[in-house]
Amino acid sequence: MVLPIVDFGAVAPELALTVFACLLLFAGVFLKENGRAVNPWLALAGVLVASAYAACPAEPHVSFSGMYAADRFTQFFKLMFLLGTGLTILISAKYSDDERINHGEYYALLLFATVGMMIMAAGSDMIVIFLGLELLSISLYALAGYTRMRAESNEAALKYFLLGGFAAGFLLYGMALIYGSTGHTGLFGIAKAVSHGSPNYTLLTIGSILLLVGLGFKVAAVPFHQWTPDVYQGSPVPVTAFMSAGPKAAVLAVMIRVFEQSVAFMNVDWTAWITVLAVMTMTVGNIAALVQTDAKRMLAFSSISHAGYAMVGLAAANKGGISAVLLYMLVYTFMNIGAFGILALVARKGEQRTRMADFTGFAYTNPGLAVVMTILVFSLAGIPPMAGFIAKFYIFMSAVEAGQYFLVFAAVVNSAIGIYYYLRFTVYMYMKDPAEQLPPLKASVGLLLALVISLYGVLRLGVAPGPYLEMAAKALLSF
């Protein structure tokens, strides 16, 4: 069913976030210094309002002349993005005060980036997808360099901007070739043209490969991952947490739509291509993480490996694999943003303490936070009964069902490698004496709330993932 061109209900969450982002910009003008205390809570209110709109059930349909999908698949991702943004705002409240970046613009950029992710997940036309991707990218370029007094932050923004623009060229050129070969920019139109055998398959294949390269850059898949460690290390910690979760999920949503709805009918084995990317991404990410001494940089390489695990579900190319990808990204949002939240607290002002060694003796001075960090890194490592184990289990089982035994073997070996560098956190926290007496750290209300939500998500999805997996499976009924 195609609705009229204007359908405000389909974009209600995006409109809500846009309105609150504009209010944040005006708050700094009219409230002056008082606006700083309001900023995080006004941004959080915007997320809650948008979540209320996103959670409202609606009849699945496409709107804006078939360019925008309002279905369960879109709804699942929108709620996931809003969850990640809300957690990021909570861990940003005290950090932004300490770093003197508590400006309305900072939170407005977070909301605009979330709007971009929502547009990407809902886009059923390549033009709409590209607009969402650019809105997300421009916001992230600014956020990466937001702590302007730190040289590392400026370097991160510059590298991200230059390499991001280069990758956008690949993406846009690929879209142009796909349009040139099929005569359509809409995903359903492309699928129809491909299934009827009418396009120029040479141009279509080249365009699809270039599209995969551009999306591979955004999801930090090897060999398009070189920007990730430097950008993650130089960006403010809450921004790094935000970049590691939401944008990856948005790109995976686009990959699912494009390669499941449009070019899947081509006489090309896309499963083989994605399998190669998944194995390289898991392996390079884990091996590079092994030798890192900086916790922030280690988590950056870890995020690369997790992108590889998620791509295992794409390579499985079955309903179980795709639904497992959705569950995996939800779990990853909980555990990764929570871990970065504790890292932001340990790093302190100026992010001078982000090394693994800075966690030495953490369990003796901050036992409660150490327990939370232990649970989160155990989940990242895939140790039961945490949610990370369940998410990996469903991903791997989908690959087994698809007969991808080599891919499963590579994923299991990489998971074993990952356990080593994640457990280093517990070694430093519990088994080494600190070189200096570390003072107890005082977490803000916002950070504590974010940690409680993250902890609940990791334990709840680990013990009883059934309802969430069912929700992910229902999201695929749109296909």
Image (spheres, rainbow, N blue to C red):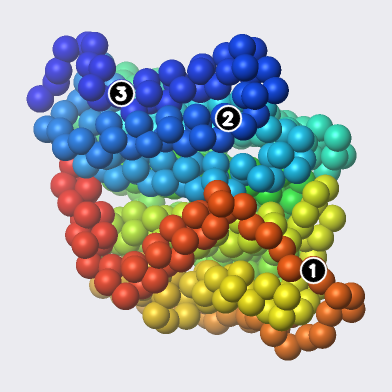
Say whether residue 226 is left or right of residue 64. Answer: right
Residue 14 place in picture, x, y as percent: 38, 25
The quarter of the displayed image where residue 182 is located: top left
Whether 96 is drawn above or below 276: the answer is above
Local packing at callout 1 (Cα closer than 10 Å; few below 14, some 14-19, many 20+) is: few
Whether 136 is drawn above or below 75: the answer is above
Q: Residue furthest bottom?
A: 431
The disc label shown at residue 398, or none: none
The disc label shown at residue 439, or none: 1
Whether 225 is drawn above or below 309: the answer is above
Answer with mark 2 or mark 3, whichever residue precedes in sequence.
Answer: 3
Q: Which residue is mark 3?
A: 11
- Whether label 1 touches label 2, CB < 8 Å: no
Answer with mark 1 or mark 2, whichever residue precedes in sequence.
Answer: 2
Q: Is residue 434 visible?
A: yes
Say whether residue 241 is left or right of residue 101. Answer: left
Answer with mark 3 or mark 1, whichever residue precedes in sequence.
Answer: 3
Q: Secondary structure at mark 2?
A: helix
- Whether label 3 touches label 1, CB < 8 Å: no
Local packing at callout 2 (Cα closer than 10 Å; few below 14, some 14-19, many 20+) is: many
Say whether residue 404 is left or right of residue 333. Answer: left
- Whether label 2 touches label 3, CB < 8 Å: no
Q: Is residue 120 visible?
A: no
Q: Which residue is mark 2?
A: 39
Q: Secondary structure at mark 1?
A: loop
Residue 130 place in picture, x, y as percent: 46, 26
Q: What is the three-letter code of the residue carrying label 2? A: Asn
Residue 313 place in picture, x, y as percent: 36, 61
Q: Secondary structure at mark 3?
A: helix
The quarter of the displayed image where residue 25 is located: top right
Q: What is the three-letter code of the residue carrying label 3? A: Val
Residue found 26% across the figure and 60% down from its top: 468
